[in-house]
Structure formats: C-alpha cells, structure tokens
Amino acid sequence: MTDVELQPWEAQLAADDVFYRAQLEYVFERSAFYRSKLAGFESAAMGGLAEISHLPLTDKRELRATCTPENPIGTHLCATTSEVVRIYSTSGTTGTPSFVPLTAGDLENWVTASARSYAASGIAAGQRVVTTYNAGPFVAGAALASFERIGLTHIPIGTGSTERLLAAIELLRPEAAVLTPSYAAYLLECGVDLRASSVVRVLVAGEPGGGEPAFRAKLEAGWGARVTEAMGIGDIGVSLWGECEEQDGMHLGARGFVHVEVIDPETETALELADGITGELVLTHLRHRAAPLLRFRTRDHVEVRMSPCPCGRTGPRIRCLGRTDDMLIVRGVNVFPSAIREIVSAFEPDVSGQILVRPQAAGVKQEPPLPVSVELAAGRAADEGLADAIRERLRSALVVQTHVELVPWGSLRRSEYKSKLVER
C-alpha cells in the first residue's frame, strides 16, 4: 500500500485542485473541442474543483461527432504526433471504433493507477498471476504492465484460450487469476475442479457482476478462492478502481490522476459523495496530456461508500450496480439486468444463474411484464412453481412485474469474455 492511498481525503482534494487548475489551462491551450464547448468561459475564472459542477458534462457521442478521416481521434486530441507513444481502440461494437491516444506520461500514470488497484486485492510480489485479457488493440492491455510493476510473475494467456488457461493453472500453479466475471463463471462448467487448484485469489473486471453478493458467492464456492473486482473506463483509464480484501467496494487507485463525481443521471445534478448514495459516475482527468476529458459521463451506475475502510485506504469506494445504457425503465422503475441476475442467482442450484432480458419495445421505457429468460440447472425440469417464485422475488425486490420463462440448461450463450444480459 502506498502513502498516497493512506492520505486523508481532504488533503487529496487540496492536491488535486492544483492539478485540476493546471489541466484546465492545458485544455484551453490545446483542445479545440473544449475551446468550443466552453466558449464563454475563461480557464482562469472557472475556479477549482469546488466549482467543477458548473461546467457542462462531456458525452462520448460528442467526441465521436468530431472525428473525421483527417482526424480519426477527434478534436479533443491535445498532443502532437511526436508526443503520442500508443493508441488503443475500442471494440467498435456500437459503430466505428474510438481511438484512445496516450503520451509516455499518460501511460505511466495508467500503469501506476492499475498497480494500486490490483495490489489492493492482496496479491504480492513473488506470486504468480495468470491473465486472460487481450494485450492487442484494447485498453485492457495496458493493465498487464501493472502486474510486473507489483512484482508478480505474469503468465498472459489472452481471451478464448480455455484449454491453455486450464493447463497453465494446472502446470504453473499461479496463486491468482485475472478474468471477467462471465469467464470466471464459464470455467466452473468446464468439468475441472478449480477448488483443488493453486488459485486462491480471483480478480475480476471488465463488466459488472463481481460485486453482486450471490454471484460472488457462486464464484468463490466454485473456485475455492477469494473474489475481488476492479474497474476502469477506456476513455479515462484502465483499472481505475480496485477492491481490497474487505470486499466492501472498490478503492480509487487513480488518486491524483482522476477526479470523481456522482450525478443524478436524469437531472445531471452533482450529488455530494456520501455513504449509500447512488448515481452515474463522472470522471475528470487531472494530469492527462494526449486527450484529456472534463466531466466525462461513464454511464456506470454506482453506489458510494465513504465510511472508513479497515484496510486503511481513504476516500470514496464504489460498487458498480450496472450500466445506465443497459438500464430499462418499467412503469417509472429503473431496472438493471445485473440486478435481475443477482436475484435469480439466489435460486441456485435449481437454476444455472444465466439470464437474458428480452425487451419487447425499442428504447429504454418498457411496459410490464418484462420478459426474462432464466436458465435451469443441468438435469432440472421446468417447474411453474419455480417460475412463480422467481417472478415474485423480482417483484418484491425490484418492484417490477416480469414474465419469467424457464429455459433448458445450456440454451443461453456463455462467454469467454463478457456476457450479454439484454437481447432486443
């Protein structure tokens, strides 16, 4: 644990305020995007972090709208060609890939933040860790350097190599495995007793799920290991947050590099960081050079913890509840597919834990009942009483009417990377 992580949060904010004011000056000097977006503002008159909520939010769609064949990154690019040492890209599943450039300093900050986030889980120098993230074009590859920074023996396997992964676990006996929650669950159905393996820590990231109590309990029972989660946002930084062994929310590993806000996603009002509040996570770069972002909407819906953590780390912790762009609204009630999965998982061993929400209408707003496919456990026959019990539990816990369809084991698609919980 570093001294930075133990610093009183008020002292962190005071230090961050200095970085933020310098970041604003840099952005006004170099970012055509923000000079246009903040027309009428002057950086010197904007104040510090206490006034940041007065600035407009930044949406990913705005950034994409400025991309051209001549400037495929977008007008928020601040660094020159010679200053950029790496360019990552998103998968482009919703359209053209977005490009994320980094200077040498940006990359160093990403690795530092990731090392703090993953070290919080309890992994330590001298241990072995097997990872399943692709180190190719995607930003998750930047996190891989953090394992060497921690002092681990790193065994990179990559995505979609299950046989190779299981062989590495058996032969090389790593103490830790790093993968998505979906992949960690997928491996439990591969016929290998992972409880007998050398793995004592499973570090999950890449999608919500690792912090859901029932889902986490399933993974811990199946692996015979402690499960902690980490989280990053591609445009801002990889592995910004990491959970400690207390398993009570992810600590901010990117302290000094990123400023944290939580907003009401409907009114866009900034909320005071306090124990138990929920809202959309908004992040601002403090010391970024290639393509810094101000008040970036992550679309992650989180719950905040501000109470002291026994591990000694200070500042906010978060638990990701789901993606606001996956959220559905049923008769005024916000419903996250990950919350449905969490409730359904409590019905194991009668069900496999796999679910698929099938909205009937385009858009966010849906009329009840919301169709939910629930996969039965292997060898379990459909039972109307089970469907009724799941439907009633969903109504009671989430205040939403659903139509629960029990489907045979193996009929819902598994993933060696991220699961799809909504099918339109």
Image: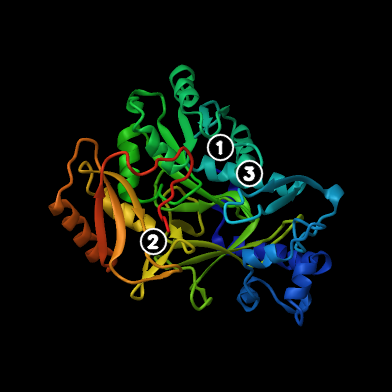
Q: Front-most of 213 and 401?
A: 401
Q: Position of residue 391 (x, y in %)?
A: 22, 60
Residue under circle 3?
A: 138
Q: CA distance from mark 1 to mark 3?
A: 9 Å
Q: Earlier in the sequence, mark 1 or mark 2?
A: 1
Q: Are marks 1 and 3 in contact (CB under 8 Å)?
A: yes
Quadrant of the drawing holding the N terminus: top right
Q: Position of residue 146 (x, y in %)?
A: 61, 38
The image shows residue 77, relative to residue 330, as above or below, that is: above
Residue ID at (60%, 43%): 140
Residue ID at (36%, 58%): 358
Observer able to see residue 297: yes
Q: Position of residue 38 (x, y in %)?
A: 73, 76
Residue lying furthest bottom: 40
Amino acid type assigned to the residue bearing label 3 in the image: Phe
Residue under circle 2?
A: 336
Image-quadrant location for residue 26? bottom right
The kind of secondary structure element at disc 1 is loop
Q: Earlier in the sequence, mark 3 or mark 2?
A: 3
Amino acid type assigned to the residue bearing label 1 in the image: Tyr
Observer able to see residue 305: no
Amino acid type assigned to the residue bearing label 2 in the image: Phe
Q: Which mark is residue 133?
A: 1
The kind of secondary structure element at disc 2 is loop
Q: Earlier in the sequence, mark 1 or mark 3?
A: 1
Q: CA distance from mark 3 to mark 2?
A: 26 Å
Q: CA distance from mark 1 to mark 2?
A: 26 Å
